[in-house]
Image: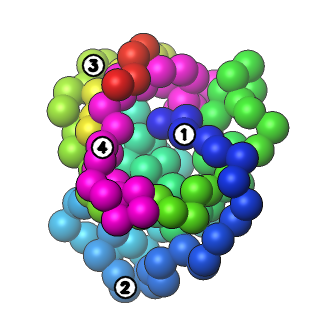
Amino acid sequence: MSRRTSRPRGPAAPRITSASPCPCGLPTTYGECCGRFHSGSAAAPTCEALMRSRYAAFVVRDAAYLLRTWHPETRPPGVDFDPSMRWVRLEILDTTEGSAFHSAGTVTFRAHYTDDGRPDSLHEKSRFARHEGAWVYTTAVFVD
Ligand SMILES: [Zn+2]
């Protein structure tokens, strides 16, 4: 997911604590799930886990995490968050490879959001690669 805008920063991110349900949708807390990856205390073991944690990083507006899990060859100079967008739910539709035994993989997902209150979604197939041992986002295979 590489959505960027040049609009200025708006209201603060929704307040999510380590005891909150994880925004990625898995039935566990943020602290036990994507929060471990955002804090750097653990690394996402699979492409799907990385995709979930990057989605959750959009929810909590953790630009530093998005940048450090972006392949250096495709990484943008910065990430801005559109204040009118609220990420609602992530649906993982398909994954290929991307396990501990692979060096690449893809994740196809639909990320639901509202834009100024209007429901919409982003459908994307993302490509991931292993870089210096850790999974990173490289490019979108398609976005619609
Ligand atoms: Zn999570």
Estimate the spatial distance between the alpha carbons at disc 3 and disc 1, rounded to whole Å: 22 Å
Whether pointer 3 and pointer 4 mark residues with C-beta atoms closer than 8 Å, the reply is: no
Q: Viewed as shown, does residue 51 lie left or right of 38?
A: left
Tell us which disc is closer to us: 4 or 2: 4
Residue identifier under label 4? 121
Which of the 4 image quadrants contains residue 39? bottom right
Q: Residue 121's x, y, as percent?
A: 30, 43
Kind of residue at disc 1: Arg
Residue identifier under label 2? 19
Q: Residue 97's x, y, as percent?
A: 31, 19
The answer to whether any part of residue 59 appears in the image is yes
Instruction: Please give the range of residues in magenta.
Output: 111-140
Tell us which disc is closer to us: 3 or 1: 1
Give the answer, above or below, for where 87 lies relative to 51. below
Q: Secondary structure at mark 4?
A: strand
Kind of residue at disc 4: Ser
Residue 121 vs residue 128, the one in the foreground: 121
Residue 16 vs residue 100, the one in the foreground: 16
Tell us which disc is closer to us: 2 or 1: 1
Neighbour class for label 2 at 10 Å: few (<14), some, many (≥20)?
A: few
Give the main secondary structure of the magenta stretch. Answer: strand
Estimate the spatial distance between the alpha carbons at disc 4 and disc 2, rounded to whole Å: 27 Å
Residue identifier under label 3? 96
Residue at image position (27%, 19%) is 96
